[in-house]
Amino acid sequence: MPEDRFGDLGPDQPSTAERLQELDELAAEEERQTGPAGPPPRPAGRYMWVVGVAFVIVVAIAGINALRHSGGGLRGPRVGETLPAFAAPLATSQLDGDANVRQTANQSSRAGAKPACQVNLPGSITSCALSRKPLVLSVIVPGVAKCENQLDTFQRLAKRYPSAQFAAVVSGKKRPDVAALVRRHGWTFPVAVDPDLAVFNLYRVAICPTTVFAKPGGTVAYTSIRPLTEPQLTNELRAIGGA
């Protein structure tokens, strides 16, 4: 087992499987709401109608329970607040371990051995270092096309706007898996690894991708919970001084 250089959050956090199940449920609901309408339903008997209503009720209850479990209102960091601090291994490094999400020296060491922005290990990146410039940061889970496509858009814009900092956190997978993803897509901006979903939790993520725009110094200007086009990204970049 690789050495955990960033500190384990401990058992008081939801497990990876629990959070990814929540993400799957919420993403599926989003697809149902935004996807194209299908063909008109065929007539069905009273029995099928009753079964259908029962199924809807079960899905609704499951969705409510998922929101209760995760605290509800998970839409990313709040506008006007400072980005929550993290330190995490870069996918392109040889550094393995969970992310450090310790915010202050007074916080429990289970979140990290020291405050995240004090971490200075080769092969790691911190949110404080990223936010020295106008920052566009997306938190994703791998294997979801719209999430990976958002980072492909980042790659195109990063060359066009060098005064901005593009970055991503890939949650739920270990570094070798994320490194393979980075190589396959050719992403050259910083991609941090979040295997145990510590940053995913910290950033109040429920929909993939969740993208945060922060001014230099880390003040959150805008958060999106759906994919953004190049013009939309450019407009938000302009608002934080990155374009």
Image (cartoon, helix red, strand yellow):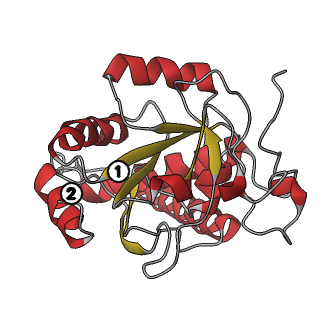
Label 2, on which residue? 233
Residue found farthest to the left: 231
Residue 137's disc number: none
Q: Where is residue 56 shown, x and y percent of the image?
A: 48, 60
96 versus 35 height, above or below: above
The residue lying at 69 percent from left, 45 percent from top is 99
Q: Amino acid at mark 1?
A: Gln
Residue 165's disc number: 1
The residue lying at 64 percent from left, 48 percent from top is 87
- Quadrant in which residue 231 is drawn: bottom left
Give whichever of 141, 80 is nearer the camera: 80
The residue lying at 81 percent from left, 52 percent from top is 112
Q: Quadrant of the N terminus?
A: top right
78 versus 83 height, above or below: below
Earlier sequence position, callout 2 versus callout 1: 1
Residue 51 visible in the snapshot: no
Give whichever of 153, 13 is nearer the camera: 153
Query: Crowding near pointer 2: few (<14 within 10 Å), some, many (20+)?
Result: some
Q: Where is residue 120 shown, x and y percent of the image?
A: 68, 44
Q: Secondary structure at mark 1?
A: strand
Residue 221 visible in the snapshot: yes
Q: Where is residue 131 shown, x and y percent of the image?
A: 45, 60
Give the side of residue 51 with respect to residue 105, left or right.
left
Give whichever of 120, 184 is nearer the camera: 120
Give whichever of 136, 60 is nearer the camera: 136
Q: Amino acid at mark 2?
A: Leu
